[in-house]
Amino acid sequence: MSDSDGWRRSTKLVRTGLARSPNNETAEALYLNSGFVFNSAAEAEAAFKGENDVYMYSRYGNPTVTTFEDRLAALEGAEMCRATATGMAAIFSALACQLKAGDRVVAARELFGACHHIVSKILPKWGIETQFVKGTDLEAWKAALSKPTNAVLLESPSNPMLDLVDIAAVSEMAHAVGAKVIVDNVFATPLFQSPLELGADVVVYSATKHIDGHGRCLGGAVLGSAAWMNEHFIPFYRNTGPSMSPFNAWVMAKSLETLELRVERMSATAAKVADWLAAQEKIVRVRYPGRADHPQHDLAKRQMRGFGSLVAFEVAGGKQAAFTVLDSLKVIDLSNNLGDAKSLACHPFTTTHAKVPLEEKLDCGITEGAIRLSVGLEHPDDLTEDLAQALAAAS
């Protein structure tokens, strides 16, 4: 048992994975190199046979990247983590590493646009059967998982309308037919939801979002059991090259130190902003898992420890009104990113989910008046005042 096993979350975020060089630096060292040297040809041979645990090439592993991976794994409660170049690299790799022609994938319909594209366009070209279900409908899951399935993919809360999937219930059904469950946990963050504890097999992140949290670096992560990672993910990872750069890993490792402080503050502000929006006449509806009027609020209370920094809302007047609101914002930036220290808003219908078929967008509640708001670290009163003047402009 390592010391970190008994540490509390705040300590893990600062101390886990710290491997000082002989120089005993205070902060994590940055190993900005591509390769490593061996003391002998025999040592190199043993390394490539897997007989000794040394760094060989930064595509396989790097000390700085390991620091980030170990720290995130400790926070998630996972046996193993591998960092990837982007969040989409994490999603795609987690699927591709375990699938072959003739396999079957069931996914929640409520997915980020690029994830939807992988399931609907890329996997079928490889002879993989795919099926979408409404993520909130357990009967739909039951029907879809009534026959052998290899992988299940879901987001909870979903992007952008914050629908929730009952992870424990879906995992139980999936395991009964032999499927591995992959959960995109970006909106909840590892602070507010632990999919592995709920029965999921694999957790993926876009570390670009809350983990970096400052709009600087791209990155992703895949976490799961050592057995699954070693059998499926590591061989794919080493031979296809979706690895994270050491510099980005260094930034991410440092960002994890403040993740709890940032996300808890952002989420507290998001709750206030959601309540304020719900009281405005121009707003048709507000979606925030922490509000009692969220259709799955009870589920959110059961499987989440907090409700996150994302708020979705719909403006009366459709696309024109939504565009006017977005164009009138002065504090909040217009951006398709999220999880940043700065508040960001976007129009999912025409950006992040532009290529999702119209019928599916509407079925997921993504209307032309819908706006996704990622709440940052600004004062809540400045955010509501900014939204107030933008809504007035749309009137």
Image: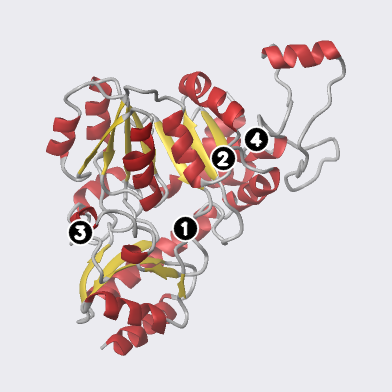
The tag on residue 66 is 4
- What residue is shown at x 59% (from left), y 35% (from top)? 70
The tag on residue 335 is none
Q: Residue flagged by tag 1: what amino acid is it?
A: Val
Q: Secondary structure at mark 3?
A: helix
Q: Secondary structure at mark 4?
A: helix
Image depth: mark 3 or mark 1 in front: 3
Image position, residue 185 (x, y; %): 40, 45
Q: In the drawing, does residue 377 fall left or right of residue 251?
A: left
Q: Residue flagged by tag 4: what amino acid is it?
A: Thr
Between 144 and 17, which is closer to the camera in this rendering?
Answer: 144
- What residue is shown at x 28% (from left), y 58% (from top)? 161
Identify residue for label 3: 362
- What residue is shown at x 53% (from left), y 44% (from top)? 220
Can the viewer see residue 77?
Answer: no
The tag on residue 84 is 2
Q: Is residue 350 above or below residue 7?
A: below
Q: Secondary structure at mark 1?
A: helix
Cα gap from disc 2 to disc 4, whole angstroms: 12 Å
Q: Residue flagged by tag 2: what amino acid is it?
A: Thr
Counting residues from the start of the chain, the first of labels 1 and 4 encountered is 4
Image position, residue 369 (x, y; %): 25, 72
Q: Secondary structure at mark 2?
A: strand
Q: Residue flagged by tag 3: what amino acid is it?
A: Leu
Image position, residue 131 (x, y; %): 24, 36
Counting residues from the start of the chain, the first of labels 3 and 1 encountered is 1
Image depth: mark 3 or mark 2 in front: 3
The tag on residue 263 is 1
Q: Residues within 10 Å of mark 3 (few under 14, many from 20)?
A: few
